[in-house]
Image (cartoon, helix red, strand yellow):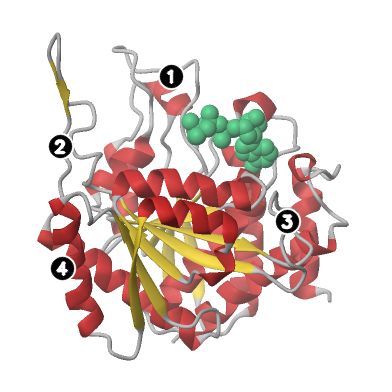
Amino acid sequence: MTKTFDIAVFQGDGIGPEITGPTLEILKRMASVSTGYNLRFRDAPAGARHYAQTGESLPAESMKIAREADAILLSAMGLPDVRYADGTEISPQIDLRKALTLFAGVRPVTVKKGQNTPLNMPADREIDFVLIRESTEGLFYTQGRGEVTKNEARETLLITRDISEKLFEFAFALARSRKEVGRGPGRVTCVDKANVFRAFAFFREMFDAEAARNPDLQADHAYVDATALWMVQKPWDFDVLVTENMFGDILSDLGAGLMGGLGLAPSADIGLEHAVFQPCHGSAPDIAGKGVANPFAMILSAAMMLDWLGIKHDNADLRQDGTRLREAVEDVVSQGRVLTRDLGGSAGTDRAAQAVLDALFVA
Ligand code: ATP
Ligand code: MG
């Protein structure tokens, strides 16, 4: 019998519902054509608008739907004018990351031939690497709880054996799966500052141990400052980069910059059991309700979800459809005929999503 995968869907705030609708249409079409899998979607209400209406930003029922699902698809949550009573931002995506221990933040950085990038790239080059940002500890460990006195402020950098081992195991597995499909040479680079901080020498110890368990893959080290330089000078050399929380936070924005902005930047937050897939951009309230939002980052996040489900459940059809969906978006973007305003075109959300459907099913 064909397996059915349950997908929890957080439509979210602002442009969230506008980009979720067409993304689900595409996934439904792909699943209905495939004989290898079925998808079932369950709506999980949450976010700033939901908070304004009900007083809850992440209801227990939505959390339950997320926990029970095989994967979680999320658009964007939060609105500038809706906050908790104490003034803090409403961001249930961060609550999900904590509750489900999603330690690996995965940010693919791709620039295909013909795609806009601020880099002056040699014509024969393409960028295709993945940055993995540890997302539960590191320099964010004391987030909001740092010690501040009149003359001093302190925050803690926490690196644990447990999370580091899981993180590196994930990084090497990802490099192997990329190698299998010809996307990379199978190389993992540990990005740190081990020359200055003992915590990063410790980080490297776990990395080297995982590297030794994966003799079929390459492993190397790079300092974070040099990595920033190389991301601009020769980003086509990278395959899988894995790093601490704060370094990853900064480098992933650099990565989004290479891709020409947020409109094409997908992401995943992955743990041992659960995973959330969402575009890197926010809820873009300034353009919400106008039908002009770019759906590509959301669709690319959905492609990552199919790929991850395919790897986890050893389902070749899912993996194949993940690749097909990503390549369909890449084709539409590199042909440059149907682009949204943020990418320099004039197409609305629906026409952009339709172009992806056409690339999948008409071509
Ligand atoms: P957050 O704090 O939630 O990350 P943000 O303040 O970083 O939000 P975004 O919501 O990501 O901001 O929006 C930043 C800018 O990018 C806005 O001008 C927005 O309109 C634009 N933008 C973001 N996402 C899209 C999209 N999918 N299509 C078109 N424009 C977008
Ligand atoms: Mg932002």
Kind of residue at disc 1: Ala
**Residue plotted at (44% across, 57% down):** 227
Q: Secondary structure at mark 4?
A: helix
* Label 3 environment density (alpha carbons within 10 Å; few <14, some 14–19, many ≥20): few
Dot 4 and dot 3 residues touching (CB under 8 Å): no
Marks 2/4: CA–CA distance: 20 Å
Kind of residue at disc 4: Glu
- Image mark for residue 70: none
- Residue 179 drawn at (x, y percent): 47, 84
In the rendered structure, the answer to whether residue 348 lies left or right of residue 146 reads right
* Label 1 environment density (alpha carbons within 10 Å; few <14, some 14–19, many ≥20): few
Residue underneath mark 1: 52
Residue underneath mark 2: 156
- Residue 89 lies, with reference to residue 191, above or below; the image says above
Residue underneath mark 3: 120
Q: Secondary structure at mark 1?
A: helix
- Residue 318 lies, with reference to residue 14, above or below; the image says below
Marks 1/4: CA–CA distance: 47 Å
- Residue 30 drawn at (x, y percent): 63, 72
